[in-house]
């Protein structure tokens, strides 16, 4: 007789099948079916009961890519919601509508919900958690950030005794792939975007990725968990990589940096600051070596110190791995008639503050007239806003213009913006080519 791993001598009840309603049968849904079907016996031992997908909701049955399961294919959500035998609803449709409504209704019906939906969780998490609490059911969402990387559970449980001061991460595989190609092969933005689309790493409409919106949703979720505060995607500043040129990448290399699109969440005396933007990372920073489609999340806690979670941030099987792990946890709770899950942890009413109040060092690339006194004039304008220059790179360009690159000391965002507005109107300045924030190097 097979035995459970929970308790020595506890026998599995082979008749107590835990049935699932799966919403969506796309890439990740297919991966979930594969894992549950291929590991059926193995998972049965771990849970203490068999897990079975009973019904799958799809929009267009004729577009199904495969028939890996004998589950019933349905097009009406009520066939799942009205089925009392279905205890777990797994939402993998994506997008806000109708996914949010389906999840909310499932929770109201007393069904546990597992989701990978960052759009819904970053915007409507509180509403869903409140309903899960009322219904005494689980709401798990490990796959909503970082694909197969365990990060939601570590923040909620493993690092729960820490006072976390910062979470920063590379949490969008598309842009990381693009920046890696631009850095290693000298490709420009348009060329590498076309390649990423051809390989399936970027959507035909890449806006959510390249404008930082996808990463903003994810960092909002992580900030809520890390700081115990209600942070939504609307609180997060988002800036993408469209303006990153080969010149910027080359200058970054020369100065000892790598450019990455990074999501950052910090808490300090002002409150919580959440943002996504390109960042010059020192080459020895742990995130600087995270390349291609890989993701990584770097966490600073008062007890644990610095720790990093690394792996594939998307894809069929990595994301399905996270989804099925959540299914496993819910199924265990069902078997034992209890819930050990930590639901909403947003007990802190600490406010968020805007990007203008954030502090960072800056990389500023300018095209200026090649004549004496230009640098001094620009430095004077910066100084009026308390912006100090840390280093300068100057290279002669054609037509009597010089490309000037400045790295500043840390300063408030609003000070840099005010100074650049004046600098951009100076007759000696042809163009402010780019402005990118800089993560300071550790002092020796």
Image: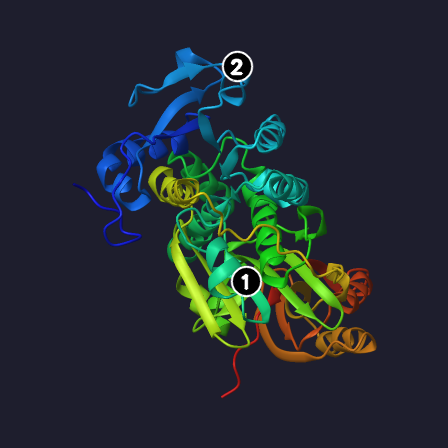
For disc 1, the marked residue is 168
Say if residue 96 shows up in the picture.
Answer: no
Q: Is residue 3 left or right of residue 273?
A: left
Residue drawn at x 58%, y 64% as measured from the top left: 397
What residue do we see at 71% from left, 76% from top?
375
Q: Is residue 68 left or right of residue 273?
A: left
Q: Is residue 22 above or below residue 189?
A: above
Residue at point 46%, 53% (across, down): 179
Q: Give the answer, above or below, for where 168 lies relative to 173.
A: below
Q: Position of residue 167 (x, y in %)?
A: 56, 64
Q: Nearer the viewer, residue 223 or 291?
A: 223
- Outermost residue on the left side: it is 1
Specify the color scheme. Answer: rainbow
Q: Earlier in the sequence, mark 1 or mark 2?
A: 2
Placement of 208 over or under 53, stated as above or below: below
Label 2: how many residues lie within 10 Å, few (<14), some (14-19) or many (20+)? few
Which of the two residues, 238 or 373, is positioned nearer the viewer here?
Answer: 238
Whole-number angstrom distance, CA of label 1 to CA of label 2:
40 Å
Q: Are marks 1 and 2 in contact (CB under 8 Å)?
A: no
Q: Secondary structure at mark 2?
A: loop
């Amino acid at each position: 007789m097979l035995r459970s791993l929970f308790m020595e001598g506890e026998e599995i009840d082979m008749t107590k099948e835990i049935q699932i309603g799966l919403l969506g049968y796309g890439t990740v849904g297919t991966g979930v079916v594969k894992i549950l079907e291929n590991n059926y016996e193995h998972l049965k031992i771990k849970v203490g009961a068999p897990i079975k997908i009973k019904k799958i909701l799809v929009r267009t049955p004729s577009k199904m890519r495969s028939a890996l399961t004998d589950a019933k294919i349905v097009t009406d959500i009520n066939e799942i919601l009205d089925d009392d035998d279905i205890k777990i609803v797994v939402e993998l449709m994506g997008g806000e509508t109708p996914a949010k409504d389906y999840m909310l209704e499932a929770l109201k019906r007393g069904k546990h919900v597992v989701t990978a939906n960052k759009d819904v969780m970053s915007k409507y998490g509180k509403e869903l958690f409140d309903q899960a609490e009322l219904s005494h059911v689980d709401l798990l969402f490990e796959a909503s950030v970082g694909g197969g990387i365990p990060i939601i559970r570590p923040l909620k449980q493993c690092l729960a005794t820490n006072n976390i001061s910062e979470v920063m991460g590379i949490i969008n595989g598309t842009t990381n792939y693009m920046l890696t190609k631009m850095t290693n092969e000298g490709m420009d933005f348009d060329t590498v975007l076309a390649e990423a689309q051809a390989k399936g790493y970027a959507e035909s409409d890449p806006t959510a990725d390249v404008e930082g919106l996808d990463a903003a949703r994810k960092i909002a979720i992580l900030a809520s968990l890390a700081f115990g505060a209600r942070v939504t995607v609307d609180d997060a500043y988002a800036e993408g990589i469209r303006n990153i040129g080969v010149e910027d990448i080359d200058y970054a290399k020369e100065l000892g940096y790598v450019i990455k699109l990074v999501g950052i969440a910090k808490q300090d005396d002002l409150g919580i600051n959440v943002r996504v933007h390109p960042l010059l990372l020192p080459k020895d920073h742990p995130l600087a070596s995270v390349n291609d489609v890989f993701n990584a999340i770097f966490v600073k806690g008062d007890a644990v110190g610095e720790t990093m979670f690394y792996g594939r941030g998307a894809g069929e099987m990595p994301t399905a791995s996270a989804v099925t792990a959540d299914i496993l946890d819910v199924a265990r709770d069902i078997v034992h008639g209890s819930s050990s899950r930590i639901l909403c942890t947003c007990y802190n009413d600490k406010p968020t503050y805007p990007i203008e109040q954030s502090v960072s060092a800056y990389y500023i690339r300018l095209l200026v007239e090649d004549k004496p006194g230009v640098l001094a004039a620009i430095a004077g304008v910066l100084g009026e806003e308390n912006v100090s220059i840390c280093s300068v790179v100057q290279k002669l360009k054609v037509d009597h213009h010089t490309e000037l690159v400045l790295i500043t000391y840390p300063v408030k965002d609003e000070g840099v913006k005010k100074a650049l507005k004046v600098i951009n109107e100076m007759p000696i300045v042809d163009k402010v080519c780019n402005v990118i924030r800089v993560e300071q190097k550790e002092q020796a």
